[in-house]
Amino acid sequence: MKCYFNGKICDLKDVKISPYDIGMLRGYGVFDVMCTANGKPFLFEEHFARLEKFAKAIKLKLPFSKKEFADILEKLLKANGFKKSTIRTVLTGGPSSSAYLPEGKPTCYILIEKFASLPKEAYEKGVGVVTLEFGRQFPEIKITNYLEAIRNQNIKNKKGAMEITYVQKGKVLENSTSNVFIFKGEVLVTAKDGVLRGTTRNLVLKLAKKKFKVEEREVTEKEFRSASEAFLTGANKDVVPVVKIDGKKVGDGKVGKNTKIVMELFGEYYEKY
């Protein structure tokens, strides 16, 4: 497998990250994940703009321009040759002699992976989520610290759920690796603040406005649990129906008619991309 590492395209086995990299020692890093559509990076412009924003937020600079990033991805996708790929870009503070302070040499690498789709059943029959009282420290950016999500995987797995939904002070925020939406009748609602505004989330909002009234605002836990329909969105998940919350049915426990419309709108956009 070919990857990008600190300015060069190389074999994955040749990547050597310093044990004094403060991405490892201190969790000082950000990342982005995108997938391909018809062989091209899906929503590339949005992903690059977001990656720049993430880097700036932790006072680092990307080592490439948008054009250079596009050229790197084109070479990597061709070299790895997967029919559909997941693209993972990581930027950390780099090696530090103090094991604490950035020294101006960030580490950056890009991984190309064969896309791993969710089971077909997840889209046809829906999935479950479990709630957890938690709010990410910097919800507007994708930092490399996923401690809370990872240490609570056993709770999710025991309950047969696919995702963990973060709830804080009675407000529903986001999932551990995706955004969450609900339908209140014909109105589509999603959290506006305290969440990562994912690229798939943003596209779904744009597409859904063609068919539904859309509201970006606070979502109460009571609204979430009494929603007529629910679904989640993510770059490597697309649109996934949610039919159970903490083991209890959403609506009638089946994929809702409005959720199906959103899935169709997204699918049509994706196929034409």
Image: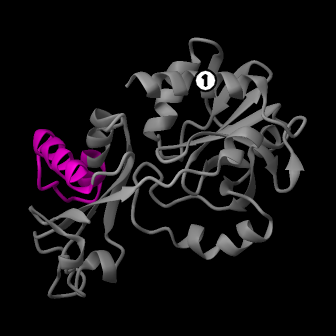
Where, quadrant-wise, is the C terminus in this rendering? top left
Q: Is 213 rendered above or below residue 124?
A: above
Q: Residue at x 68, y 38 (%)?
A: 231
Q: Residue at x 69, y 26 (%)?
A: 260
Seen from the viewer's position, the closer of residues 242 and 171 is: 242
Q: Mark 1 is on which residue type?
A: Glu
Residues drawn in magenta: 52-80
Mark 1 — residue? 264
Kindly identify the residue that appears in the image at 84 percent across and 40 percent down: 250
Image coordinates for residue 108, horizontal then vertical, percent: 20, 64
Residue 196 located left or right of residue 16: right
Asked if the magenta segment contains residue 73, the reply would be yes
Give the image location of residue 176, x and y in percent. 58, 57
How many numbered marks are there? 1
Relative vertical location of residue 156 with respect to residue 51 in this rendering, above or below:
below
Report if residue 93 lies within the magenta region: no
Q: Is residue 41 above or below residue 1?
A: above
Q: What's the magenta bit mostly, secondary-structure-wise?
A: helix
Q: Position of residue 258 (x, y in %)?
A: 73, 23
Q: Which of 101 and 8 lies nearest the eye of the viewer? A: 8
